[in-house]
Image (cartoon, rainbow, N blue to C red):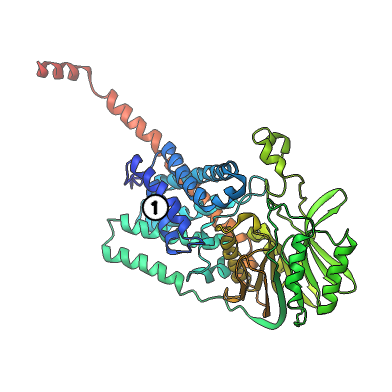
Amino acid sequence: MSPAVRAPLPLWLALIIAAGAGPVLDAGFPDRDWWPLAFVGVGMILWSLRGRSTRSSLLVGFVAGLTFYLFHVQWTALYLGPVPWIALSTLEALFFGLGSLLITLAYRWLPVAWPTKPGRLGLLPVVVAGLWTLREFVAGNWPYGGFSWGRVAESQSQSPFAPLVAWFGMSGLTFVIVWLVALVMECAFEWQVRRVWRVAIAVGAIALVLVIPAWPATTHGTTRVAAVQGNGPAGYFQYAAPGDVMATQVAATEKIIDEKADMVVWPEGSADIDPTRDQDSANTIDDLATRMNAPFVIGTITYRNREYFNTSLLWEPGKGVTDYYDKKHPVPFGEYVPDRAFWRMFAPSLIDLIGRDYTPGTRDNVFDINGVKAGISICFDIVDDQLLTDMMHGGAQVILAQTNNADFGRTDENMQQLAIARLRAIEAGRSLVNISTVGSSQIVDPSGVTIASIPAYQAGSMIADVPLGTTTTPATLLSRGIELLVSGLGLAALVIAFFAVRPLRPRTAKVETRATRSVPAPDKEKAASHSV
């Protein structure tokens, strides 16, 4: 029987490495975008978890998760202070700790349940990667819809691994990255295998992943898109007068009024006076649409049936609103407060800042714009895997991602969101228009290459002939099935290992008991006499 993995580090050193792993892992994400460091950060975390006890693995995992999220989402503290930043980071760190416990149990049980070299080099890294993906899945869906920000895959938008997202999706890419790191680590620790073979296995696995060709993102035709960034006072704490944001959008649009476009896209919340309830706002938009002879896709806040919605409107010249989409994934504690009475007891001043609660939408997220099917994503929608699948099922040929980053200033948030949007373009095989009130705004093609951009915090526009996607990628075809498969595989293997190892413990205990009872009493007397 093979022994379980032993701890290569004392607890104090494991905690130091785990604490350092957080900022290293974060450096793999935008804005720094040193993507190889994501692999290093994952490796540091796995190294610190090997051979740990149950309690120490929870502590080590919590520390790693806390330092990572404190760096990764520090933009939440820009205007709201440390309370939401620390609260969110702590919650995610708790998930990290629980996921780390499962990974530690895998290191403890699997080498005993499958005491072979294929078990340690073949199965164990797969299970570790599956359990990491499982933790991301749970944290991304619970509570209150979850928080999918900070998945390992999101660090790879500019790396050679980015094309894999079209094959495996976001969760599948996370699985591949962690699997590679876990496999290389097992090769380093597997002394019973000759060094040349261990190096060959590690290098071969990396090469195998990198030689997978990019999915052929076929396109047919183009549509000419004009996307406008007004750089208006769209931040929550800028206290602009009603209509100020829209005025900047109008001014920036006026500069391209003579340009030809098949559609004009404004950001989230760009019409800060709802044109469905205000005639002057409606007249302004209709005048622009008529002069450009193009439909407008605009963001606004609508109020219907005593409920508020974060809405994207399709406005056609002379017709007004012909379709609309309500954001399906409003941000908890940002756009609404779940269980408001309960949470208000802890931070009443912060909770009261959110004066109205947005209701999740129920309508489909695809517009038919003069025969072109456009998938609509509003801000945080972009991290929801299911919403991308819904777009593709609705026949989307291009993705319009409207957002408002004004509340996060010049922090990493806008670049992190742009990286997620770029990966979504590759994942779906669709061009994507990421248009923000203040930036960063870019148009990317189905392979993730930038077609056009607007500098952050500058008013401007992008006008480009955007390829229309026709392909169906494996990631969108299988959708969340990949995530459930790898997560379920990791969890199932861990459960099987538990039941395989469990009978060994009582048997060992009985043997030790018999051995103790078999020692006759006279032997003790002989031992005493010898000592005299």
Which residue is drawn at the image coordinates 72% and 61% (left, top)? 268
Q: Is residue 272 left or right of residue 212?
A: right
Which residue is drawn at the image coordinates 73% and 77% (left, top)? 255
Which residue is drawn at the image coordinates 42% and 60% (left, top)? 37
Res 113 seen here: no
Which residue is drawn at the image coordinates 39% and 59% (left, top)? 183
How far across and how far down the image is residue 401, in percent?
Answer: 68, 66
How far across and how far down the image is residue 239, in percent?
Answer: 72, 52
Secondary structure at numbered mark 1: helix
In the foreground, 114 or 455: 455
- Residue matched to label 1: 44
How far across and how far down the image is residue 431, in percent?
Answer: 65, 74
Residue 512 picture quarter = top left
> Is residue 497 placed above or below 202 in the rendered structure?
above
Q: Is residue 309 left or right of residue 353?
A: right
> Is residue 329 placed above or below 422 in the rendered structure?
above
In the foreground, 200 or 383: 383
> Is residue 347 placed above or below 329 in the rendered structure?
above
Name the kind of residue labelled 1 in the image: Met
Q: Is residue 253 left or right of residue 418?
A: right
In the foreground, 231 or 439: 231
Res 246 seen here: yes
